[in-house]
Amino acid sequence: MFKKMMSGLNMQGVNVETRLYNPTLQAGETLRGEINFTGGSTNKEINGLYLKLMTIAEVESGDHEFNQALVLDQWLISSKFLLAANESHHIPFTMEIPHETPITEVSCRRNGARVWIETHMDVDWGLDSTDRDYLKVTPTPAMQAFLQAMQQCGFVLSTVDVEKGQLTARNFRSTIGCYQELEFVSSQMFSGFNEVEVSFVAEAQQTHIMLEIDRTFRSDQLLTMTISNHNLDVNQITQQLRRLLQIG
């Protein structure tokens, strides 16, 4: 929840407060909340009121890397309207967040994943309202089962971040302009693995997984697998993963 006084030209005294009913949820689930706002001392023309689902992603440019805020999805809450002086509005909302929304609630050494809702009130001759309300995006049951399978295969989750770009495989493609990387290291000495980078591309009925394998004294290898979102069996996923990674 946030409250911000917009003090720019023509916006002084306008008060906006957004409240999320369920800030902890899984990707693909419905976010619920409400926006409350009150006009200032004079009438104001509002061009639009939006909610944006945002994340922070790493961008590679030549030899440099920098972080950039990215819009994952956007919803128009109200189009152009006149906000009368001292007039109060209460607007409830429900919206489904994309299945590919990065997860934020995982235990690891360094977690750089951040997801938030930004409320944006667009006005002429004034300072647009921008503020953020963070979400806690938990792994889906399919993702959680895969994470358990990685653990059973002897891997420990080390770092998590979000990269700008698109993943493309033979039978799937990411769609939201970024993808998440979960970096695993082996818990066993002399395992032959330097690291395994995992990315999820989730859909309503199944979850695609891309694995970039960095083995000792061998070139990198790109592998994919797909698991159903239903009737999950961790042991079965573990065996599938062992075959894919060629672990005895």
Image (spheres, grey):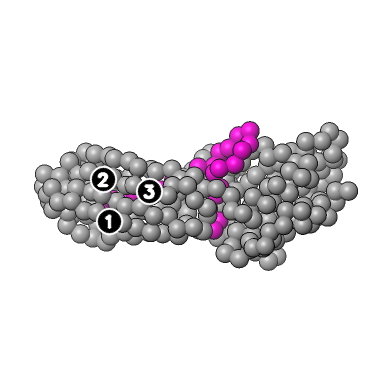
Which label sits in the foreground, 2 or 1?
Answer: 1
Q: Is residue 125 at least partly visible in the picture?
A: no
> CA gap, disc 2 to disc 1?
11 Å
Residue behind mark 3 = 20
Pointer 2 local density, CA inside 10 Å: few below 14, some 14–19, many at least 20: many
- Magenta stretch bounds: 99-122
Q: Is residue 202 left or right of residue 23?
A: right
The residue at the point 42 percent across, 55 percent down is: 31
Q: Hey, which quadrant is residue 80 in on the image?
A: bottom left
Q: Earlier in the sequence, mark 2 or mark 1?
A: 2
Residue 111 located within the stretch drawn in magenta: yes
Q: Position of residue 19 (x, y in %)?
A: 34, 47
Mark linked to residue 16:
2
Q: Position of residue 123 (x, y in %)?
A: 24, 51
Mark linked to residue 62:
none
Q: Looking at the image, which is closer to me, 201 or 230?
A: 230
Indicate the secondary structure of the residue bearing disc 3.
strand
The residue at the point 21 percent across, 38 percent down is: 7
Q: Earlier in the sequence, mark 3 or mark 1?
A: 3
Determine whether label 2 and label 1 are within 8 Å by CB: no
Q: What type is the residue that disc 3 sits on?
A: Leu
The residue at the point 59 percent across, 62 percent down is: 203
Indicate the secondary structure of the residue bearing disc 2.
strand
> CA gap, disc 2 to disc 3?
13 Å
Q: Hey, which quadrant is residue 127 in on the image?
A: top left
Q: Looking at the image, which is closer to me, 50 or 153?
A: 153
> CA gap, disc 3 to disc 1?
12 Å
Q: What type is the residue that disc 1 sits on?
A: Ile
Pointer 1 local density, CA inside 10 Å: few below 14, some 14–19, many at least 20: few
Q: Position of residue 3 (x, y in %)?
A: 29, 40
Which label sits in the foreground, 2 or 3?
Answer: 3
Q: Is residue 106 above or below residue 210?
A: above
